[in-house]
Image: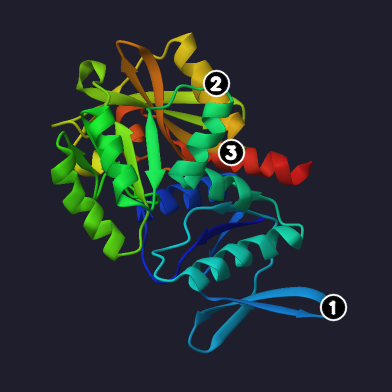
Amino acid sequence: MDIGLIRPYEVEYNNRDIVDLEEAISALGHKPRNVYVDNMGIRIGKGGIKLTQIVSRDKREDVDVDGAVLRHLGFIKDFEQFGSRLWSVRAMEENGIPVINSLNSWLCASDKLYSFILLSKKGILVPETESSENMFVAYNAVKDFKEAVIKQLRGAMGFGVFRVNDADVAMHIFSYFTNLSKPMYVQKFLEKKGGGDYRIIVVGDQVIGGEFRKGVDWKSNIAQGATPLPAKLNAEMKEIALKTTEALGLEYAGIDIAETKDGYYVLEANPTISWQGFKQATKINPAGHIVKHLITKIKK
């Protein structure tokens, strides 16, 4: 089989994860192929949909794979660019190519606001949150929460995340967001036990392991200097991770969970997880599990 890895050509994004997937595909006797979402051409006509991509200046090839893993859509600079990349992946699905995670589930889970709407409706605990384009709504949320965290809706790895306990200080941040035409996303700050949180990786309907990310400060992202440590997961944590994955329709994910004095809270569901810290802590490589799951899906 030819197994595609959907990612942008424009940047090397989480390259070590791509290498892990390529090695896992080859080890299982299949051929890895990069599918560059920003180099694709979609030709629509009487014959249906034909997908091609440019792989070098003078070489064009058909996008003809048996299945694909959606890794990333790249750094988005424009709404129409985002739409083009979304529909390129959807065109693959319309051509009968199984993609994990599916475009719909990836889109829902990668948006912090909508993923929390779905999780809260399923009764899964998430931090108290308010989102708005109006800075005065966000201002009042900080006043209500007393101590708050301000995030981008589609941010990653803990970059550009602020912790504030003064609504007037927060107003300067909201002014910046407003000038960029970005909505404001405000969460009540949670005091996490142990100074960190758990990342639990789910593939299919199985929890394959978890790590505890010990932060150097209040952030627990590996990209922000947190230390990945092996974690012993209890039954409740596993159940929350599985319910979260199911609620968002994901087939592989990293679920971030914080333990607090009031119980376990889901902080985020990551549909294009980077697993290098997890691999370091647990000695488990998720790539093989993901590829095996995709192959099973292709054969159905």
Residue 130 place in picture, x, y as percent:
38, 38
What's the distance in space between the residues labelled 1 and 2, CA to CA?
A: 46 Å
Depth-wise, is mark 1 or mark 2 nearer the camera?
2
Q: Residues within 10 Å of mark 3 (few under 14, many from 20)?
A: many
Instruction: Determine which of the numbered discs, if any, sits on residue 123 in the image.
Output: 2
Q: Residue at x 49, y 10 (%)?
A: 235
Asked if one can make out residue 157 in the rendered structure from this viewpoint, the answer is no
> Which residue in the structure is indicated by mark 3?
250
Q: Is residue 261 above or below residue 116?
A: above
> Which residue in the structure is indicated by mark 1?
47
22 or 297, nearer to the observer: 297
Dot 3 amino acid type: Leu
Dot 2 amino acid type: Gly
Assign a secondary structure to mark 1.
loop
Q: Is residue 33 above or below residue 158?
A: below
- Colour scheme shown: rainbow
Left or right: where 133 falls relative to 79: left
Dot 1 amino acid type: Gly
What's the distance in space between the residues labelled 1 and 3, CA to CA?
A: 32 Å
Residue 19 place in picture, x, y as percent:
42, 53
Pick whichever of labels 3 and 2 is earlier in the sequence.
Answer: 2
Asked if one can make out residue 144 in the rendered structure from this viewpoint, the answer is yes
Q: Quadrant of residue 212?
A: top left
Q: Residue at x 55, y 40 (%)?
A: 290
Pick whichever of labels 1 and 2 is earlier in the sequence.
Answer: 1
Left or right: where 109 falls relative to 215: right
The C terminus: image quadrant: top right
Q: Residue at x 30, y 28 (%)?
A: 281
Depth-wise, is mark 3 or mark 2 nearer the camera?
2
Residue 244 place in picture, x, y as percent:
53, 28
